[in-house]
Amino acid sequence: MQVAVEVARPEAAEADVVAVPVVDPPSPLAGQAAELDRRLDGQLSRLVDEGEIRGRLDHVAVVHVNADGLPARRVALAGVGPREAIDADTLRTAAGAVARATRDFGRTVAWMLDDDLALPLPEQTRAVVEGTMLGGYDPGLWKTDGSDRRPSRRLVLWSDGDFDLARPAERARRVADWTNRARDLSNMPPNELTPERLAARASEIGEQFHTLTVEALGPDEMRELGMGSLGAVAQGSHNPPRLIVMRYEAPSPARDNLVLGLVGKAVTFDTGGISLKPALYMEDMKGDMSGGGAVVEAMGALADVECPINAIAVVGATENMPGGGAYRPGDILTAMNGKTIEVINTDAEGRLVLADALWYARQQGATHLLDLATLTGAMELALGDLYSGLFANDDEWGEQIVAAGEASGDHVWRFPLHPRYRRYIDSHFADMKNSSILRQGSPVLAAEFLREFTGEGPWAHLDIAGPAFFRYSRGDYLTQRGGTGFGVRLIVELADRLSGR
């Protein structure tokens, strides 16, 4: 869905639908809903009494009205839940519900921002824009009757305040657009999104901005660099791997001594290799590149909003396929940093991809590393589809990422790292092994494995297995099956905070 966003006073804008938040319980109506009810001679209050209008989160009642001075024939009453529980996520959910409820007739939706909600207007602005764009997303790009999949819509934010909301509105629109592009990548079928195609997408982004440079290393170049870990995962596939490298040079960097390093796992299809996955839901393994896809599109977002922080992205893109040339359990690999790895399970391939990518990013000058990967099913069992798991070797760096997650809506929860966990990856034959036969601590042993390849300096790992790709609706503004674009908003928020902006 393509959305144009603008800010206007109520008397200065026309719309097909006026949307107004309704607190639970809705009686008596408060804030903008009460003001609108007065203009409608109590029509809304009567509908509240009849049970048609409710304040329950995600409930939307669309009613026809006829009032002088109101530039719309419909009003969408959007429940935002109990007043004490209202936050940015509840407004995102309400805005997403309005976008879906008015999809067929609401080409222009006017949202009434409300001081009565006790949420600052700039935060309301951001939440409504994101909720509208992310909640209105349609994953059916490949449907033959999907010509209207991305209708052009207009969102007008009505405010009587003196706040300059145009800037946060436009910024939120741009970041949400890049987030939806990351969703498109996650949803793309694996016969289309090969490693080469993902690299081509990165190049397309690079061509849009003079501050971005992009290159993609092929198998021969990776072999020359000694990337035996990533290379082993790729060797069973007919589609060759790519190491995608994107560099963003900020026009006026706020911190010359800081380079944000973003590393993404992009296994464009994961069969599990010789350690084959079960057939049920294997089609969802096209989403195993969601971390890498988010990193690629986030670099576009950083350039688009002209973030004043230099950044480098390194994305390991490959398939993980069985076959005569595939790597095997029992193989011993040599990673780019010279460490050796015994393969226990070929379905623990993501950490092998990240190992070489992390080391390369540090060698290329990244001072602060963050990797994103759909790494372990156990993390989804632990946190479900709302939070990603965070591991960090530096407390301050970890706290910055948690804060960026809370502000952006890409929520993260920190898990421990401890030297005693290292025993999980001890090998009798090599420096380490890539998995463990013990059914204990699989997300943390994966993080301990990655720590071996992070070099000196702050590093954090986000295991995004739960919130990156949905099998079922989450019940909020992200209701659609498939990719969510998790990480794009977090990365932009984190970069902003690093710059002090």
Image (cartoon, rainbow, N blue to C red):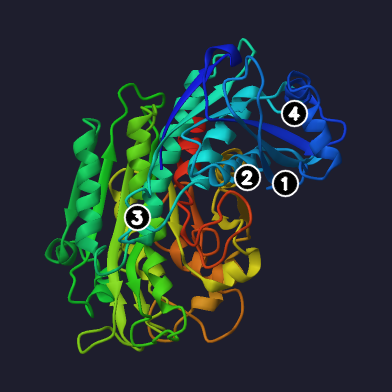
The amino acid type, in three-letter code, at marker 3 is Gly
Tag 1's secondary structure? loop
- What residue sits right under mark 4 in the picture? 117
- Crowding near the residue tagged with mark 3, few <14, some 14–19, many ≥20 C-alpha atoms within 10 Å: few
| Left or right of residue 110: residue 142 | left
Tag 4's secondary structure? helix
Q: Earlier in the sequence, mark 3 or mark 2?
A: 2
- What residue sits right under mark 2 in the picture? 93
Cα distance in 3D space between marks 3 and 4:
37 Å
Question: Mark 2–mark 1 contact, CB under 8 Å?
Answer: yes
The answer to whether residue 399 is visible is no
Cα distance in 3D space between marks 4 and 2:
15 Å
Q: Earlier in the sequence, mark 4 or mark 2?
A: 2
Q: Residue at x 51, y 36 (%)?
A: 106
Query: On screen, 27 above or below 434?
Result: above
Tag 2's secondary structure? helix
Cα distance in 3D space between marks 2 and 1:
8 Å
| Left or right of residue 302: residue 448 | right
The amino acid type, in three-letter code, at marker 4 is Leu
Cα distance in 3D space between marks 1 and 3:
29 Å
